Amino acid sequence: MGGRKSRAVVWIWSGVFGLTLVVIVVFLHLRASSTNSHTSLNIDQPPSETELDGTTPIDATEVSQVVMKTGLTLPPLDFPPGSVEEACGFNDFLPYHSTTFESDWDSRIPLASEKCWSAMETHINTINPLHLERDHRRRRTFLFVVLGEPLTFERIFSDPQGDLLRVQDALSRTECLLTGDETNWELKDSCHAEAFLNYALINRICLGSGWSRAYTYYLNNDDLTPEQDRLGWKESLEREWVEMKCEELDQTLEFSSEQYPELHKLVISFQNSTTKVKKNALELLIELSARLGDEAAGLSLPRQVLIPRPGSNKEEGYKFGRFTELLASRTWQELTLKQVPNADRFYKIFHMLARAESQNVDTLKAIRFDWGQLVQHMCIPPSSKTLEYISDDGVVVRFTEQDFEVMLEPELEVFEDFFKPKSCQEIVHEIRQQRGIKSPTVLAAIEKFEQVALEMGVYE
């Protein structure tokens, strides 16, 4: 009996000692975490290293090493001087998809370096935010068409407060309040068409529910090339830079019914009363920008969603700009899908591109295309075995490899194109041999396509 009591006492004191030890460890861990936590960043200027650590200044060249564990690394790459990758020290970063990050890792730390911040700013200023759209159709429309006045992050971040004032000025003048099917591109400057789009995008990207952008994904993250892995870091730091830039904005820029009740009510009144799916104020601002002649707004398409909801980007600026005829065509809609090279589709696309670029049409409607983007999109088959096409009722339908396997009688030509896609060279040769094209503009479009495909190494 006494032995059992002794053992019980030992167990009790062991438990007390163990519990005390756990409490001490937790306390020390929390204290360390508190000491290492980062203060808020002032992004009127690139955040300094001392703001990230209140005790010891960090040399800019050591920032990336400080924030990551040593050990797992990738072979160094030769980055151009002044590039984001070189300035931010990407060669010192761990693999992007590694699970060995510090528990208190803050992906903003590389941007604490003035050199990194400046390189990222230079890089992002040239990007069209709509090139990063998650909706493929919307993104490809902006990638394929070359604008005379490009839409960039530099443009929308240049003067948000001034854009708000210009929007308020335009909305106070009757001639700028276009509704229904009205357009008047001659009012572009006097009614500040550009400011409407800038202001709407600042609200959407910075003051809404958060920036929703596309990222590059790979089927197997454990087998990436160093270049693919570094791209993951670059996209991550791009997002951080934009979010930090957004944080410096005055919250009074938000276009809400609470903050600007009369203006908000006025914009909502532009809504077509017969429309089943109602649009929000930002979508209507973008459409008004297109009505007044802003080219970028005139490329805007509604995002494709199964169930329309508030904030789902339903603007239809394409109905009011100079690209209306092009973007409303069935051939353009087919082009924006990712499909395997196909002779019938290429034949229609060449005619469409030639007609749109032709100098014989109204110069206000003549359109310039980014042939590099077009060629890459058309010549490189889908990386995943998926075929997209538009049904007769306008719905985008996607077939996978498994879908084809269970179909009883798939069309032989479609089946072969899907599993054994032809090269662009084979497709163009087939068109030249079998279609008897006589139009000089169409032949010129095909020759331009071939030349670019050869230069990019995607023709054969």
Image: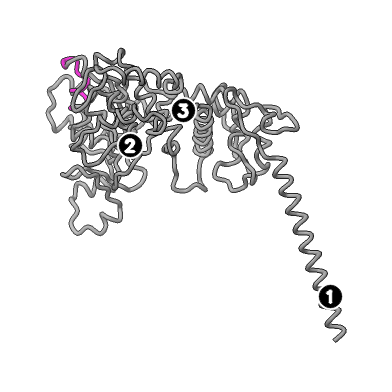
Mark 1 residue crowding within 10 angstroms, few (<14) / some (14–19) / many (20+): few
Seen at 75% across and 59% down, the residue is: 22
Q: Position of residue 277 (x, y in %)?
A: 25, 41
In magenta stretch: residue 124: no
Secondary structure, mark 3, is helix
Tag on residue 313?
2
Q: Position of residue 104 (x, y in %)?
A: 64, 43
Give amino acid for label 2: Asn
Seen at 32% across and 35% down, the residue is: 280
Q: Position of residue 408 (x, y in %)?
A: 19, 59
Give amino acid for label 1: Val
- Depth check: 220 or 78 in front? 220
On the picture, is 373 further left or further right than 276? right
Secondary structure, mark 1, is helix
Mark 2 residue crowding within 10 angstroms, few (<14) / some (14–19) / many (20+): some
* Residue 379 visible in the displayed image: no
Give amino acid for label 3: Thr
In magenta stretch: residue 355: yes
Mark positioned earlier in the residue sequence (3 or 2) = 3
The residue beneath circle 3 is 252
Q: Name above or below for residue 35 compared with residue 3.
A: above
Spatial CA distance of label 3 from label 2 is: 22 Å
The residue beneath circle 1 is 9
Quadrant, the C terminus: top left
Seen at 79% across and 60% down, the residue is: 20
Mark positioned earlier in the residue sequence (1 or 2) = 1
Spatial CA distance of label 1 from label 2 is: 69 Å
What range is drawn magenta here?
351-361
Spatial CA distance of label 3 from label 1 is: 66 Å
